[in-house]
Amino acid sequence: MAIKSLLLNLGLNNNQASVYLCIVRKNIITAGEISKNTGVTRTTVYDALKVLLNKGLIVEKYLDAKKVFSPDTPSKLKNLLEDQITGTNKIIKFLSSSYNPKFSKPEIQIFTSQIGIKKMHDLSLIANQKKETIFIGNTDTVFSNLSVRYIKNYIAQRIKFGIRNNVITTSNVKDIEMYSHINNRKSLREIRYLKAKALLKTGFFVYDDTVWIFTNPSEGFTIMINSKELSETIREMFSILWEIASELE
């Protein structure tokens, strides 16, 4: 089942996921009833219940002198994802202390546009040590294949993690309409515009030593390059263009 697989990806084991889904479906249920409905032994059910209670995914209460269990709001599942991101950041910080870039070669990967863009967004939240991203290019290369809901969710996560975003894009009507409603201070973003759209047929997104290159949607691929020298070069180019770009009036 797809939902159960997602729960496993969030860190629950097979029995915990089965017990949790059973409670969500039944709304109010005893441990014995959970065991009958899932086929999980009662001892294992109690172990799973303890974990789910500790994670805040379910609540325990009494009904007619019987101990029963009910689901808490499903939005609590976000806490599991946030715990994973926090744990991953700690691992990255620890491993980075031993990482020696002098002995590493640039890593290059190629994706289809939509897959690459979503992977870029995920990694920019998890692996962003500088808490900063820059983008230069045509926004169509990033946003054309993504839903408004997905974009808003990514922006909310970026703001939550305190990651700033500086953007240089074109001054065409579509780009201006996309960004004109944004409060830059609240969204930790600053945007400037260039008039020469012909120069920006692709897009470059940079965080730390990672550079993402987006082609036009008609070509449909994305390139990720981990390279300190390339990222520094793109940042230098960005700084030069930043000085001649203009703010939205």
Image: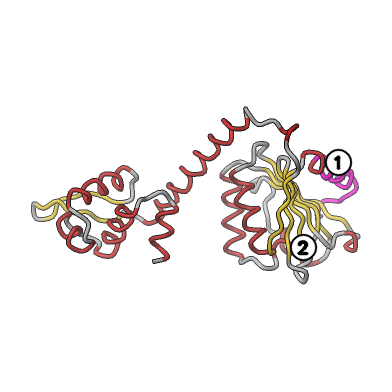
- Residue type for callout 1: Glu
- Which residue is painted at 29% across and 51% down in the image? 58
Q: Callout 2: helix, strand or loop?
A: helix
Report x, y in % for residue 82: 48, 45
**Along the line of sight, the residue nearer the viewer: 98 or 185:** 98
Q: How many residues crowd around disc 2 within 10 Å: few (fewer than 14), some, or many (20 or more)?
A: some
Quadrant where the N terminus is found in the figure: bottom left
Task: Report whether 190 appears left or right of 171.
Answer: left
Residue at image point 42% right, 60% down: 5
Give above or below for 95 relative to 51. Answer: above
- Per the image, the residue denoted by label 2 is 175
Numbered mark located on residue 123 in the image: none
Residue furthest toward the left? 65
Q: Secondary structure at mark 1?
A: helix
Residue under label 1, please give it.
236
Query: Which quadrant of the rendered structure holds the C terminus?
Result: bottom right
State the separation of the CA atoms marked 1 and 2: 24 Å
Colour convention of the picture: secondary structure
Which residues fall within the magenta stretch? 232-249
